[in-house]
């Protein structure tokens, strides 16, 4: 897999990332094979979507990471499980947003990397089971849940993330199958949200799928606002749709003008009232850290760098970024951290946009601190309290760990020949949907 010397001083870090991922993968195989999650402390297994109906989540999330790491025998092992065991005919309600970014995206990425059409067939199968959430909605805004076997829908009380984070996955399915329905349904939901923006061109985050009415006034670049903005830009980049760029620019210009502020020399994005611009909260979620990368990707490099500087101040203070902080006091308002990948996500995007080594240094710190605090008997554990000494762990490892930060680190440090570093696309779950070099 290339030699350390070929990769210069980052080679040993890349090797360490690959070794940790494969170490955790072996424990998953031995103790939780086919489960959604491994329980890394006890070595048990855990379902994510629906109790009693595992769909091999961690395995599906890991495939493209293993492929980029050239662990081809492990890719084959995972694909064999998917082909032999993965069946979505489950009479239970699945969350449409999570099923899309993780299962549709994971299977689509596995197909993109391996070229194995059986994986595309399964991505289409589960996507088709999600469509009633869109087609049965009077507004085109999808319901939150759909029964994968019966198509029964539920959960109209939703948000802009869960109605607006489909275009990357649905769009490549339309491109790869020729069926335009996926793209059109995903984009229409985004149009409905954009057209309901306030006079200030800001968006609240909670909305009702049946009435189309806003359910709150608060605007945020963190959850549950974040990936709606991300997928406007991503859709424009992936599919050259100028309307998406227009919507993205309108909303982003408003966020930068009315939802950003400097505090103690650092750039932050407070929560504001979308209709008046009044600041409602100066709490910042670790998940909002993705926005530094999105700003850099979309031409706002200085703001992206400045926002990453802000989260670097938090990482420097706590070692591992807490779930949320009050940035006026730099105190943790929620002390846990569920192995969140956003800081590494943005470090990769900023390094690709600028070539500045500082972002690889920052990501290396993120990796080393994660290993030091989360590594346990059978894998990597989420943290219950990053402020405890030592930080206390929880007996769970989220599916996105297998797809996100370990892939971001690998791409930052390995210079792998399997990625087109100039032209590729990673979804909000880091599923590789463009740029695999077979
Ligand atoms: O977009 C997302 N939001 C939450 C998870 C990571 O924190 C993950 O599922 C994904 O990155
Ligand atoms: Ca994300």
Image (cartoon, rainbow, N blue to C red):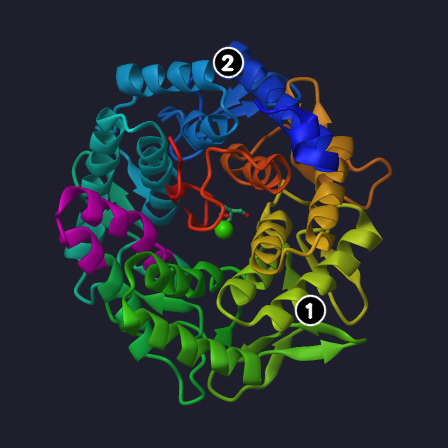
Camera-side mark, 1 or 2:
1
Q: Position of residue 343 (x, y in %)?
A: 64, 52
Location of the N terminus by quadrant is top right
Q: Which mark is residue 337?
A: none
Q: In the current view of this chain or complex, which residue is farthest to the right?
A: 389
Front in this rendered view, residue 102 or 41? 102
Q: Which mark is residue 29?
A: 2
Q: Position of residue 127 (x, y in %)?
A: 23, 42
Mark positioned earlier in the residue sequence (1 or 2): 2
Evaluate whether residue 324 shows in this view. yes
Location of the C terminus by quadrant is top left
* Magenta span: 162-185
Q: Position of residue 250 (x, y in %)?
A: 41, 80
* SS majority, magenta: helix
Look at the numbered disc 2 and say if its residue's Cβ is closer than 8 Å to ligand 1: no
Q: On the image, which quarter does residue 160 sit in?
A: bottom left
Front in this rendered view, residue 254 or 47? 254
The local secondary structure at tag 1 comes to helix
Residue 172 shown in magenta: yes
Q: Residue at x 32, y 71 (%)?
A: 193
Q: On the image, which quarter does residue 185 sit in?
A: bottom left
* Location of mark 1 (residue): 306
Front in this rendered view, residue 160 or 233? 233
Marks 1 and 2 close (CB-CB < 8 Å): no
Q: Is residue 222 left or right of residue 244?
A: right
Evaluate whether residue 393 shows in this view. no
Q: Is residue 221 left or right of residue 284?
A: left
The local secondary structure at tag 2 comes to helix
Q: In the current view of this chain or complex, which residue is farthest to the top?
A: 30
């Amino acid at each position: 897999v290339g030699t350390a010397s070929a990769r210069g001083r980052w080679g040993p870090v890349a090797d360490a990332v690959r070794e940790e991922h494969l170490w955790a993968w072996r424990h998953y195989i031995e103790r939780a094979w086919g489960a959604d999650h491994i329980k890394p402390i006890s070595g048990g297994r855990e379902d994510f979507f629906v109790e009693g109906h595992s769909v091999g989540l961690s395995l599906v999330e890991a495939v493209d990471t293993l492929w980029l790491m050239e662990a081809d025998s492990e890719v084959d092992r995972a694909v064999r499980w998917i082909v032999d065991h993965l069946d979505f005919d489950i009479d239970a309600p699945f969350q449409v947003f999570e099923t899309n970014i993780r299962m549709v995206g994971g299977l689509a990425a596995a197909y993109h990397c391996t070229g194995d059409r059986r994986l595309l067939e399964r991505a289409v199968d589960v996507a088709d089971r999600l469509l009633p959430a869109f087609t049965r909605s009077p507004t085109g805004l999808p319901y939150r849940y759909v029964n994968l076997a019966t198509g029964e829908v539920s959960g109209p009380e939703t948000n802009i993330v869960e109605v607006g984070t489909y275009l990357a996955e649905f769009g490549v399915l339309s491109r790869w199958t020729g069926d335009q329905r996926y793209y059109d349904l995903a984009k229409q939901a985004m149009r409905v949200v954009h057209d309901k923006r306030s006079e200030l061109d800001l968006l609240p985050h909670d909305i009702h799928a049946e009435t189309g009415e806003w359910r709150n006034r608060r605007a945020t670049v963190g959850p549950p606002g974040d990936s709606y903005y991300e997928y406007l830009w991503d859709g424009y980049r992936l599919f050259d749709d100028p309307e998406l760029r227009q919507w993205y620019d309108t909303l982003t210009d408003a966020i930068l003008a009315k939802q950003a502020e400097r505090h103690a020399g650092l750039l932050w994005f407070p929560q504001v009232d979308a209709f008046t611009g009044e600041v409602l909260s100066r709490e910042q979620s670790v998940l909002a850290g993705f926005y530094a990368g999105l700003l850099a990707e979309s031409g706002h490099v200085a703001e992206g760098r400045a926002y990453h500087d802000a989260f670097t101040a938090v990482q420097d203070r706590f070692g591992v970024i807490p779930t949320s902080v009050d940035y006026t006091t730099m105190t943790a308002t929620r002390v846990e951290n569920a192995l969140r990948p956003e800081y590494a996500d943005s470090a990769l995007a900023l390094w690709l946009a600028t070539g500045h080594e500082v972002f690889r240094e920052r990501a290396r710190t993120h990796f080393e601190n994660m290993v030091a605090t989360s590594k346990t008997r059978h894998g990597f554990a989420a943290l219950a309290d990053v402020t405890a000494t030592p930080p206390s762990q929880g007996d769970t490892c989220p599916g996105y760990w297998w797809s996100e930060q370990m892939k971001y680190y690998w791409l930052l440090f390995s210079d792998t020949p399997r990625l087109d570093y100039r032209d590729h696309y990673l979804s909000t779950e880091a599923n590789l949907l463009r740029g695999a070099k077979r």
